[in-house]
Image (cartoon, helix red, strand yellow):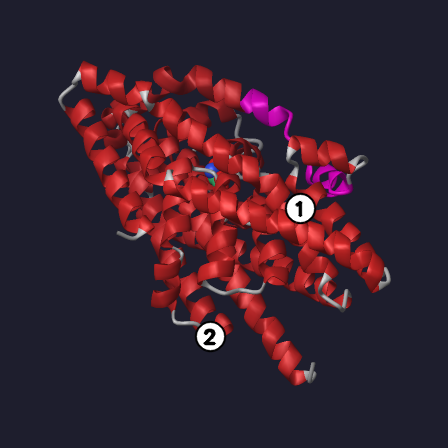
């Protein structure tokens, strides 16, 4: 049986077990499901353990073997532009749907009161957390690590990427007798990391069962009921973004068959969905990119780690819908100028979000404060409205975030191929 089939079965089984525990209020089953959740968390730790050595080693090898360093500047420029462009499209889809369907006008007052009283305190604590979020200028500044070991030790992706590229470029400037054994060493580290991923992936079905079972068993179905229209708008937006934006990018920019592409990346999508973390999924998406999609290392090792941190289309789309929903409930409509502001802030703010569960909520505070400035609405009250279904939507938006990163890798690889053909290299 293929691994993704096993993971899919585990996912469905976990969801069914969680639903049964929830619907029939089976305390024993719920306790068991919550008790085995650490198996899932152990697995997340295991796969996250590979992220830093894998990203560092593969990026050093990718950069050092490029031959032409200006190529990296070109790839970097194209990648960032593509990421910002697709994120802005995602936000626009979210806004358009929210204007059309108006999920906020469909929330009944009783449900509103319930959400307020249940989630207000948690909303306030998230707003507090957002106060510590670095500004865009700080994020850009922090990309240059003062101490690369510190960046590696704390797993800060952008400074790690920066140092790995700088180091790889310096290596490529050395004479080959000096360079080759250093590259050989990192090549070995990279391959060992890939072997670890294969081993860890064999355990993925058990982890997925444990993670999904606990999430669903704990989930308040009542909350889902009151936030159903809002959740469906987010889901519809995510589906449309994949079906149109990514499919078009694959067909016309990457010139790959979308169906085949989506089939090959299923494992990464399932892991993203189950873990709600682009970072934890990064080793899986790198493996999928290199082994299944056969994307060159120099592209995959740069585009994917960068994407896990700065490219979050699903998260940005979610923020657009959530902001509109909160505004519709608390203050009524917001003007088109303010909505244009949402496109800008949500696109830029998604750069700063880390690829970890619930990071989107922190960014939502930033977007919300901007969009509702001057209305006197307490952002904590807004956040409280959407917290109840956050985990469920986080799973879906993370799957889209990872799909976006992998699509980008295919697009950038093709454009590099075309460039090489045109310039005869
Ligand atoms: N969990 C998301 C990710 O890792 C971020 C978010 O939307 O909360 O990509």
Position of residue 325 measured from the top left corner of the image (x, y, whole percent): 39, 38
Decide which of 393, 414 is in the foreground and name it: 414
Q: In front: 13, or 77?
A: 13
Nearer the observer, disc 1 or disc 2?
Answer: 1
Residue identifier under label 1: 56
Label 1, label 2: how many angstroms apart (C-alpha)?
30 Å
Q: What kind of secondary structure does the magenta stretch mostly adopt?
A: helix
Per the image, the residue denoted by label 2 is 255
Residue 252 included in the magenta stretch of the image: no
Residue 101, visible in the rendered structure:
yes
In percent of width and height, residue 416 lies at 62, 72
Secondary structure at badge 2 equals loop
Residue 341: in sight, yes or no?
A: no
Up-down relation of residue 145 to residue 291 (above or below): above
Q: In the figure, residue 338 lies in which quadrant?
A: top right
**The CB of the residue at mark 2 lies under 8 Å from ligand 1:** no
Residue 258 figure quarter: bottom left
**Residue 198 in the image, given as x and y percentages of width and height:** 45, 47
> Magenta span covers which residues?
127-144
């Amino acid at each position: 049986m293929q691994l993704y089939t096993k993971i899919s079965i585990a996912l469905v089984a976990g969801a069914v077990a969680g639903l049964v525990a929830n619907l029939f209020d089976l305390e024993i089953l719920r306790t068991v499901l919550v008790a085995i959740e650490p198996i899932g968390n152990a697995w997340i730790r295991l796969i996250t353990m590979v992220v830093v050595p894998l990203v560092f080693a593969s990026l050093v090898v990718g950069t050092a073997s490029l031959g032409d360093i200006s190529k990296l500047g070109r790839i970097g420029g194209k990648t960032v532009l593509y990421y910002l462009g697709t994120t802005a499209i995602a936000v626009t889809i979210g806004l358009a749907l929210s204007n059309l369907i108006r999920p906020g006008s469909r929330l009944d007052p009783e449900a509103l009161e319930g959400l307020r009283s249940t989630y207000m305190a948690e909303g306030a604590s998230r707003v507090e957390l957002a106060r510590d979020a670095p500004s865009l200028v700080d994020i850009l500044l922090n990309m240059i690590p003062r101490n690369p070991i510190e960046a590696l030790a704390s797993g800060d992706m952008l400074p790690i990427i920066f140092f790995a590229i700088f180091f790889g470029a310096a290596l490529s400037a050395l004479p080959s007798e000096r360079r080759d054994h250093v590259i050989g060493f990192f090549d070995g580290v990279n391959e060992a990391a890939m072997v670890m991923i294969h081993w860890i992936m064999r355990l993925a079905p058990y982890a997925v069962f444990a993670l999904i079972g606990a999430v669903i068993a704990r989930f308040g179905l009542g909350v889902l009921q009151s936030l159903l229209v809002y959740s469906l708008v987010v889901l519809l937006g995510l589906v449309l973004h994949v079906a149109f934006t990514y499919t078009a990018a694959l067909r016309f920019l990457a010139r790959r068959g979308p169906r085949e592409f989506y089939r090959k990346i299923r494992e990464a999508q399932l892991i993203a969905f189950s873990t709600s973390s682009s970072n934890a999924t990064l080793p899986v998406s790198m493996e999928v990119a290199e082994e299944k999609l056969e994307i060159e290392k120099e592209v995959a090792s740069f585009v994917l780690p960068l994407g896990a941190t700065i490219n979050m289309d699903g998260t940005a789309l979610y923020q657009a819908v959530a902001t509109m929903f909160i505004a519709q409930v608390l203050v009524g409509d917001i003007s088109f100028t303010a909505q244009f502001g949402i496109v800008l802030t949500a696109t830029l703010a998604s750069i700063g979000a880390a690829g970890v569960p619930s990071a989107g909520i922190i960014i939502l505070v930033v977007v919300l404060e901007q969009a509702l400035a001057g209305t006197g609405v307490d952002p904590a009250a807004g956040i409280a409205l959407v917290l109840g279904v956050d985990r469920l939507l986080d799973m879906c938006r993370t799957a889209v975030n990872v799909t976006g990163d992998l699509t980008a890798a295919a697009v950038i690889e093709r454009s590099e191929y075309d460039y090489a053909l045109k310039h005869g290299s």
